[in-house]
Amino acid sequence: MAGFPRFAWQRGRVGPFADASVSLADRGLLFGESVYEVLPITAGRTRWIGAHFARMREGAASLSLAVPPWLHPPVAWPDALVAAEGITDGLLYVQLTGGPAPRAHLGAGAGDMFAYAMPHDFPDAARRARGIGVILRDELRWARCDLKTTMLLPSILGKRDARAGGADEVLWVDARGTVVEGGSSNLAIVEGEAIVTPPPGPWRLPGITLAIVEGLAGAMGLRWRFETITRERLRQADEVFVTATSQLVMPVVTIDGVAVGTGPIAKRLGDALAEAMSRG
């Protein structure tokens, strides 16, 4: 299976990726009844397990999914999987589904959980300095974007639209006319010595990387505010950046093909986050 991992973790054990499977009656497959997490791996270690698994437990509870013991601390199996795969730097993908059950909207499955690890080249300082381009698009997603579920078709469509337009990411604009987050990233802007990000709520994911960056910003003496961001405010900001597990802190350099402000703060935060990831 070229291009796929060699191993997968499923139901408490590590085995060949080719042997892992889910039932055709799995509620995650049939209804999208599942949650997932993507965790960074650096120096052969899985980082920030506590925060990612806490968010996964909260999402599972919101969907009435049974939370298996493998998501409760102490957790050692992620690093066992990473060691088996032989990855130094990469991403750990974990998914919890509703499990197999007779097909009915109000059915209940026993639950299923699997994970695998993949190599990943995190953006270095040069790539972060180049930044990315984004496009603005009207919100296509459902009303509970704070839950990290696997219903990602709107994000796939948005990212395809971005690529077709020569951009790297889509930023969603909700019915209120405010920019809430990216297709797979959280959004922040810089105004003077303050960082502004959309307030928490059902319209955006409570990003783990974003929360870590907030702590780093505080240590640098930067103010952090939760406020709505309109299209115009976005375009007039001193800096715009997105955060994500795979992208760290990535400056936005164009919006809908028009150049926007750049500056030192996103770079400082990106460097600090890269350093934090190397420490664990």
Image (cartoon, rainbow, N blue to C red):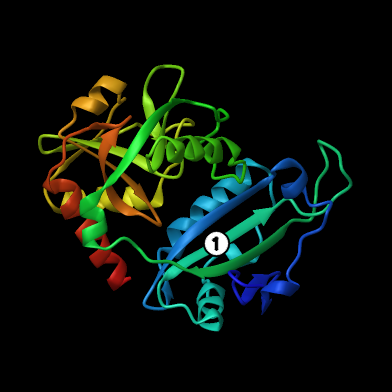
Horizontal and vertical percent for residue 277? 31, 66
Horizontal and vertical percent for residue 262? 16, 40
Residue 123 position (above or below residue 62): below
Horizontal and vertical percent for residue 139? 49, 26
Residue 216 visible to the viewer:
no
Q: Secondary structure at mark 1?
A: strand
In the rendered image, which quarter contains the N terminus? bottom right
Residue at the spot x=19%, y=26% of the render?
A: 236
Pointer 1: residues within 10 angstroms few (<14), some, or many (20+)? some
Residue at the spot x=54%, y=69% of the render?
A: 117
Residue 229 position (above or below residue 105): above
Horizontal and vertical percent for residue 199? 35, 31
**Which of the 4 quarters of the picture holds residue 167?**
top left
Looking at this rendering, what residue extends furthest in the right direction? Answer: 102
Residue at the spot x=72%, y=48% of the render?
A: 28
Residue position marked by numbered label 1 in the rendering: 93
Nearer to us in this view, 19 or 224? 19
Q: Is residue 44 left or right of residue 24?
A: left
In the rendered image, which quarter contains the C terminus? bottom left
Residue 152 position (above or below residue 209): above
Nearer to us in this view, 90 or 256? 256
Residue at the spot x=18%, y=49% of the render?
A: 218
Residue 120 visible to the viewer:
yes
Q: Is residue 123 left or right of residue 13?
A: left
Task: Look at label 1 and name its amino acid.
Answer: Tyr
Looking at this rendering, what residue extends furthest in the top direction? Answer: 176
